[in-house]
Image: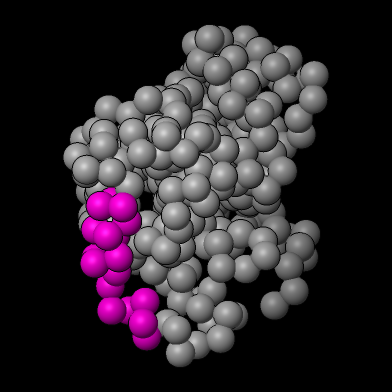
Amino acid sequence: MSDSPAGRLQALFEGHRLTPTQRRIAHCMVRRAADVPFLSSVELAELAGVSQPSVTRFAVALGFDGYPALRRHLRESVPAVAEEHAAYNEYQQAVLGEIENLKHLAELLADPAPVERAGRLLAASRPLPVLGLRAASSQARGFAYFAGKVHPDVRLLDEGGSMLDDRIDAAARAGASALLCFALPRHPREVVDALAYARSAGLTVVTVAESAFAPVAAHSDLLIPAAVGTGLAFDTACAPMLLGRVLLEAMADELPDAQARLEEFDGKAAARGLFVD
């Protein structure tokens, strides 16, 4: 497990059966991992949108006497690297934070089984719907662009609204067996609703989200976490993007004609003069 603040929190929460409210607090703590050791219970409650007593009960559920004991534990376990980061400006700290997120992802991938399972599910789904709205739309679009070079039928779902369920229905009727979702904060309600609908339509939902405690977790059959950076005004998502490329690799490994499709594309691109050397 990574020694990053988010990694320590993930390890702390693992193995505990949390209520929906407690999962919301856990999600908020992972999102604000670097700040949590210095927040009061009232401040954490406000950030998570829950009551202060809920934060206290959450700490007790984790095995602590109360929130002060939990906060003391987190402060004592802050890695030395946090002090080193204090010497850098906010832009450098944002980059260093993303490096920590990538290290955490590398450690997660030491067990390739979840990614390999996801690759099999995505390769077998014909068509393959790929969902990502708002902040996650660029992740979904990037995956769909490259996936279309090796997968015979990729359907990008990057617009919400009343047609979203219809497009999921259409994919299911056409034979889809799985749906890939990129879900990043802030999580649109329609993404959560769409995943619930996809599962009711018989699709297996594979999700890339910033933590196992994200709101989409309850409607995902397989969730692979990749932390986002929160050091700037707008979140940074280097780890989710890289995880998307890893999933592409795993999916391509399960498609016997993937290499032939790539070579065919390269041949046609050269004949058309598509790219400038």
Q: Quadrant of residue 254?
A: top left
Position of residue 21 in the picture relative to residue 188 (left or right): left
Q: Is there any visible trace of residue 10 in the rendered image?
A: no
Position of residue 253 in the picture relative to residue 232 (left or right): left
Expressed as whole percent of the image width and height from the top left, the position of residue 267 reads: 63, 57
Magenta stretch, main secondary structure, is helix
Residue at left offset 66%, top offset 13%: 169
Residue at left offset 44%, top offset 54%: 40
- Which of 40/186 is in front? 40
Q: Quadrant of residue 113?
A: top left
- Which of 38/239 is in front? 38
Residue at left offset 57%, top offset 38%: 49
From the viewer's perspective, is residue 256 above or below residue 267?
above
From the viewer's perspective, is residue 260 above or below residue 206?
below
Per the rendered image, the range of residues in magenta is 68-84
Expressed as whole percent of the image width and height from the top left, the position of residue 47 reads: 56, 47
Q: Is residue 81 magenta?
A: yes
Q: Name the image quarter holding the N terminus.
A: bottom left
Q: Name the image quarter holding the C terminus.
A: bottom right
